[in-house]
């Protein structure tokens, strides 16, 4: 399974917002510039996260976004469920669509159990678990180009 870019960027946006001092609002422009994304894309993700209740958004001059609740109260499993639009791991056509394996295939059930295990694992973590430990020196977030590349598994320099 591969998370969509929407989920990937949404998690990173929340990580950025969670690392801000209490009361500080972040803007879509700030996050977009920092991660090399289009502001329209970040705004779309912000809107989705706000609608789902993960972000509080403030409109107008001096507006922006902040977490709607403490990072320790933001379960990763719930975030992924809200951000992902399709959890179908295989295309099962079923008996009505003349699947050659209809009635004999157990793949879908096994993959659904695996997906449930994946989400259950994420349910055991919160947004706070993704943040640097308290007291760690604050660093400027690196742009997405510094992230591990999914294709090769390359790890960015420390």
Image (cartoon, rainbow, N blue to C red):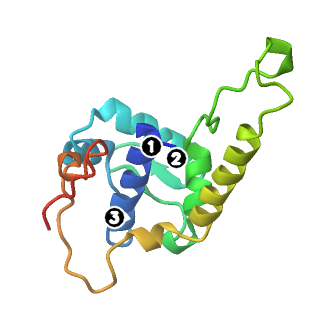
Q: Nearer the viewer, residue 73 or 75?
A: 75
Location of mark 3 (residue) = 24
Q: Percent position (x, y) of residue 23?
A: 38, 68
- Gap between marks 1 and 3 measured at Cα: 16 Å
Q: What's the residue at 47%, 66% (across, down)?
A: 127
- Gap between marks 2 and 1 measured at Cα: 5 Å
Q: Residues within 10 Å of mark 3 (few under 14, many from 20)?
A: few
- Which callout, 1 or 3, points at the residue further toward the start of the chain? 3
Q: Is residue 52 visible?
A: no
Q: Nearer the viewer, residue 136 or 147?
A: 147
- Which callout, 3 or 2, points at the residue further toward the start of the chain? 3
| Image quarter (top left, top right, bottom left or bottom right) of the C terminus | bottom left
Circles 2 and 1, Cβ within 8 Å, touching? The answer is yes
Along the horizontal axis of the image, is 137 left or right of 63? Answer: left
- Gap between marks 3 and 2 measured at Cα: 18 Å
Q: Residues within 10 Å of mark 2 (few under 14, many from 20)?
A: many
Location of mark 2 (residue) = 49
Answer with the quarter of the image where residue 86 lies: top right
Location of mark 1 (residue) = 46
Q: Nearer the viewer, residue 131 or 124?
A: 124
Q: Percent position (x, y) of residue 135?
A: 27, 86
- The mark lying in front, picked from 3 and 2, is 2
Q: Is residue 96 above or below residue 59?
A: above
Q: Percent position (x, y) of residue 139?
A: 18, 69
Q: What's the residue at 55%, 66% (across, down)?
A: 69
Q: Is residue 53 above or below residue 120?
A: above
């Amino acid at each position: 399974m591969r998370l969509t870019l929407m989920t990937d960027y949404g998690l990173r946006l929340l990580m950025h917002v969670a690392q801000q001092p209490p009361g500080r609002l972040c803007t879509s422009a700030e996050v977009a510039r920092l991660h090399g994304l289009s502001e329209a894309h970040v705004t779309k993700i912000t809107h989705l996260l706000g609608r789902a209740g993960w972000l509080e958004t403030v409109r107008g001059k001096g507006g922006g976004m902040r977490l709607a609740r403490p990072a320790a109260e933001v379960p990763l499993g719930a975030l992924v469920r809200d951000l992902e639009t399709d959890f179908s791991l295989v295309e099962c056509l079923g008996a009505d669509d003349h699947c050659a394996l209809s009635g004999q295939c157990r793949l879908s059930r096994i993959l659904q159990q695996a997906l449930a295990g994946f989400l259950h694992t994420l349910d055991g973590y919160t947004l706070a678990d993704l943040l640097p430990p308290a007291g760690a020196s604050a660093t400027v977030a690196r742009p997405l180009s510094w992230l591990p590349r999914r294709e090769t598994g390359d790890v960015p320099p420390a």
